[in-house]
Image (tube, coloured by chain):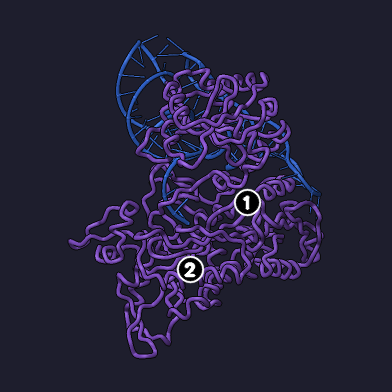
RNA sequence: GCCAAAAUAGCUCAGUGGUAGAGCAACGCUCUCGUAAAGCGUAGGUCGUCGGUUCAAAUCCGACUUUUGGCUCCA
C-alpha cells in the first residue's frame, strides 16, 4: 500500500453541529468555570483555548508550575464553589480595540493572538462570569446555576502544544467531563470502566494472545499461539475471499535497494518514517515501509497488454515504519505491521467498476467480521499546486469514488482538499460494539507512482499508455485490525475465530481417556479443541474455560462415554444440550460456516 | 520527540528511610468429584536499568529504558 504521505490537514477532535446542544453549552461553560478556578489559584496563568469536546471539555493553560493530582482536587473544589455562587454568564460584543486593550492589560498573550485570527467580518464577543472574562464566541448557559457541581469530574492533565504545533510552547491541558446530572456522570464513568475491561492490551494479556518486550524493542508485536490461531483464521478467510474475488496473491521482499526508494520518491517524502539503511555489497538497502514499489516491479517485469488488465494483486505485506516513541499504543500503533495490501492496475475505462468492486468487497469483509455500521469519507484534490496529475484524471477518479459510495448507499462526508498529493481516496470508518469509530479501510488513487516508474500497458490501438493505479487496504493492518476486533468482541470471539473452539472437560479423572479420544476426533474434523486433564475439579475447569471465553465446553462423564456423546455448555450461560460427537461436529461446522457467534 | 504519571513474584496489587508481603497462577500431597473457584503445603522477587544521597534506599535525587494519558502523526 502506498499512500500516507503526510497529510496537511489536522485532525480536529471537536465535534461539529453540537453548538445547539444544551450539553455542549454546559461543557463549554464548565471550561470557563475551570479557567476561572485556575486563574484564582494561579493568578499569573496565561489562558489559551478551552472548548467543549465529546463527553466533556478541556482548557489549555500556561502555568507557573506543573500540576499534581492534588491540584486537580483543589481546582475541582474551587469550581464547585464557583458553580454554587450562581455566577451569571454575560456576553458583551466589543470592538477589536476594546478586546485588545483588555487582554493586553490582563497580559493574556494567547488571547491577543487569537484575536488577530478573528476575521474582520466577524463580531468579537467576550463572556464574563464572576471575575473571569474570556474571548469567546459562545454560547454559554445563563448562569452557573445551570451547571451541576456533582456532575463533572476533572480527568487528566496533559501537555498540548499551542495551536497544535510542536514548534510552539507546550501548554498544560486539563481534561474534564461534564453532564447534566450526577447519574449521567456515573454512567459515563461506568462506560470508561467497561472500555477498560475490553482494552485489547488487557485482554491480550489475560487471554495470552500477544506481547511486546522492552528488551527487544517497543512497537514490535509477538503473537502467542492463541493470538496466532486467531490471526490464522483471519488470514485464511482473507486469502480465500481474495482468490474468490479475482485477486492474485503476491509475496515480496522485506528490503530493497535505494534505487527502488529513490524512484518511488519515498526517500524524499517518506524519509522520516523509514529506518536507516543497511549496507549490502556496498549498496544501501532499506527495510520496506510500503509494498507498492515491489508490486510495481512485478508489473514492470514484462510488457502488459490491455487484455490482461485489470490486475488485482494482494499481499499480506509486513512493513516497518519509524513511529515516534510517544505515539506507540498496544496493537493500534506499532512499528512493524502487516498490511492487507493490494494494488489494482487498470485502464481508465475500467476504473469505475474496479472501485465499485473494491468497495463491495470491503463491505462484504466487514460484515463477515461483525461490523455493519460503516461510514465513508471522500477526500478530494488538495489546493492549487499541491498535487500531481491532470485535472481530467482527478475528476474521473473522484467521480468513480463518489459513484461507488453512492451505489452502495453508504453514508459519506466529503473532505474537500483532503486527498493526498498523488490522488483522491475513500476511507471507511467502522463503528465497533461500543460505538467507537475506527478508520480501517482506505482506497487511494495514485497518479504519481505509475509516472515515476514509467508504467505502461499496450492498448487496443497498439500505443503504450499509462495504467491507473489504486492502492487499497481493507482491514488496514492485521495488528490494528486484531486490536479492534479484540475490543469489539470483548475477547469473546465467535466460533470461527475463537482460538479454542471447544474445551473438553471430563467430570472426573476416570473419563480422561474418553476426553482424549474425543479431542483427537475433533482435531481430525478440523476443529480447534483442547482437553483439560488437570487435577482441578470439574467446576473449576468450567470456570476457567468460561474466563477464557471459550465458546463451547464439552462436559463428559459416564453417560456421555456410554452413548459416545457430549454435554454441550456454551459460554453464554448454562443451557445445556446433549448431542452425539458427530452431531457436535456438524453443529460446530455449521456455526463456523455461517460465522455465527455461538 | 514534547508534557505529565507509572514500573514491586507469571498476573492483579499492598508496602513512604530500618530483615520484601497478599490473592490468583505454578509445583507437591490429600480428595475422585455432573455445569463458574475442594483442602493442606512448597517454591517463586539483586523491587525496570545504571548512578548518587545516607550508617541504612523498593522508598529520597539524577540519567536511561519501557508503559500509560495527552500533543503531533497515522494503517
Q: Residue at x 65, y 23 (%)?
A: A83
Chain of the residue under the numbered disc 1 shown in the image: A
Question: Helix or strand or loop: what does disc 2 sit on?
Answer: helix
Residue bearing mark 2:
A398
Residue bearing mark 1:
A491
Q: Residue at x 36, y 62 (%)?
A: A387
In the visual, does A462 lie left or right of A343?
A: left
Frontmost of labels 2 and 1 is 2
Q: Residues within 10 Å of mark 2 (few under 14, many from 20)?
A: many
**Is residue A229 visible in this depiction of the protein?**
no
Q: Nearer the viewer, residue A499 or A480?
A: A480
Is residue A140 placed above or below A467 in the rendered structure?
A: above
Q: Quadrant of residue A142?
A: top right
Is residue A70 placed above or below A117 in the rendered structure?
A: above
**Is residue A463 visible in this depiction of the protein?**
yes
Which chain, by letter, is purple? A
Question: Helix or strand or loop: what does disc 1 sit on?
Answer: loop
Q: Quadrant of residue A368?
A: bottom right
Amino acid at each position: 500500500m502506498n499512500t500516507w504521505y503526510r497529510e496537511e490537514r489536522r485532525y480536529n477532535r471537536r465535534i461539529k453541529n453540537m453548538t445547539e446542544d444544551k450539553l455542549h453549552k454546559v461543557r463549554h461553560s464548565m471550561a470557563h468555570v475551570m479557567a476561572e478556578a485556575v486563574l484564582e489559584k494561579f493568578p499569573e496563568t496565561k489562558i489559551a483555548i478551552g472548548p467543549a469536546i465529546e463527553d466533556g471539555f478541556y482548557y489549555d493553560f500556561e502555568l507557573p508550575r506543573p500540576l499534581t493530582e492534588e491540584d486537580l482536587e483543589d481546582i475541582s473544589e474551587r469550581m464547585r464553589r464557583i458553580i454554587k455562587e450562581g455566577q451569571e454568564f454575560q456576553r458583551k460584543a466589543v470592538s477589536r480595540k476594546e478586546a485588545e486593550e483588555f487582554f493586553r492589560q490582563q497580559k493574556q498573550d494567547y488571547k491577543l493572538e487569537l484575536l488577530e485570527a478573528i476575521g474582520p467580518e466577524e463580531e468579537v464577543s467576550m463572556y464574563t462570569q464572576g471575575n473571569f472574562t474570556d474571548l469567546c464566541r459562545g454560547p454559554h448557559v445563563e448562569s452557573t446555576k445551570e451547571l451541576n457541581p456533582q456532575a463533572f469530574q476533572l480527568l487528566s492533565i496533559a501537555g498540548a502544544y499551542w495551536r497544535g504545533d510542536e514548534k510552539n510552547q507546550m501548554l498544560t491541558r486539563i481534561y474534564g467531563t461534564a453532564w447534566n446530572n450526577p447519574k449521567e456522570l456515573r454512567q459515563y464513568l461506568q462506560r470508561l470502566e467497561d472500555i477498560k475491561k475490553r482494552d485489547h492490551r488487557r485482554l491480550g494479556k489475560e487471554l495470552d494472545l500477544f506481547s511486546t518486550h522492552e528488551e527487544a524493542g517497543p512497537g514490535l508485536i509477538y503473537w502467542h499461539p492463541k493470538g496466532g490461531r486467531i490471526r490464522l483464521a483471519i488470514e485464511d478467510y482473507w486469502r480465500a475471499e481474495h482468490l474468490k474475488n479475482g485477486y492474485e496473491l503476491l509475496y515480496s521482499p522485506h528490503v530493497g535497494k535505494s534505487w527502488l526508494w529513490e524512484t518511488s520518491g519515498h526517500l524524499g517524502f517518506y524519509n522520516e518514517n523509514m529506518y536507516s539503511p543497511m549496507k549490502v555489497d556496498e549498496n544501501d538497502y532499506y527495510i520496506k515501509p510500503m509494498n507498492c514499489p515491489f508490486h510495481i516491479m512485478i508489473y514492470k517485469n514484462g510488457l502488459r497488454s490491455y487484455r490482461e488488465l485489470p490486475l488485482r494483486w494482494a499481499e499480506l505485506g509486513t512493513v516497518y515504519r519509524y513511529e515516534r516513541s510517544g505515539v506507540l499504543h498496544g496493537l493500534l500503533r506499532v512499528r512493524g505491521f502487516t498490511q492487507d495490501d493490494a494494488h489494482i492496475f487498470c485502464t481508465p475505462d475500467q476504473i469505475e467498476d474496479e472501485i465499485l468492486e473494491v468497495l463491495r468487497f470491503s463491505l462484504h469483509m466487514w460484515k463477515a467480521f461483525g461490523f455493519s455500521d460503516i461510514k465513508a469519507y471522500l477526500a478530494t484534490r488538495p489546493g492549487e499546486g499541491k498535487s500531481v496529475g491532470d485535472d481530467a484524471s482527478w475528476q474521473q477518479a473522484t467521480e468513480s469514488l463518489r459513484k461507488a459510495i453512492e451505489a452502495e448507499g453508504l453514508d459519506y462526508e466529503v473532505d474537500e482538499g483532503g486527498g493526498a498529493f498523488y490522488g483522491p481516496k475513500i476511507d471507511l470508518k467502522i463503528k465497533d460494539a461500543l460505538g467507537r469509530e475506527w478508520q480501517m479501510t482506505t482506497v487511494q488513487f495514485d497518479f504519481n507512482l505509475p509516472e515515476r516508474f514509467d508504467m505502461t500497458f499496450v492498448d487496443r490501438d497498439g500505443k503504450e499508455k499509462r495504467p491507473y493505479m489504486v492502492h487499497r487496504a481493507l482491514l488496514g493492518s492485521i495488528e490494528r485490525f486484531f486490536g479492534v476486533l479484540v475490543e469489539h468482541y470483548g475477547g469473546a470471539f465467535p466460533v470461527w475465530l475463537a482460538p479454542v473452539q471447544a474445551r473438553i472437560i471430563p467430570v472426573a479423572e476416570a473419563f480422561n481417556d474418553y476426553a482424549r479420544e474425543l479431542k483427537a476426533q475433533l482435531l481430525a474434523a478440523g476443529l480447534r479443541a483442547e482437553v483439560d486433564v488437570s487435577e482441578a475439579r470439574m467446576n473449576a475447569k468450567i470456570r476457567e474455560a468460561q474466563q477464557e471465553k471459550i465458546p463451547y465446553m464439552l462436559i463428559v462423564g459416564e453417560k456421555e462415554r456410554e452413548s459416545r456423546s457430549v454435554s454441550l455448555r456454551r459460554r453464554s450461560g448454562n443451557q445445556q444440550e446433549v448431542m452425539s460427537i458427530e452431531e457436535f461436529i456438524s453443529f460446530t461446522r455449521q456455526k463456523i460456516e455461517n460465522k455465527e457467534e455461538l
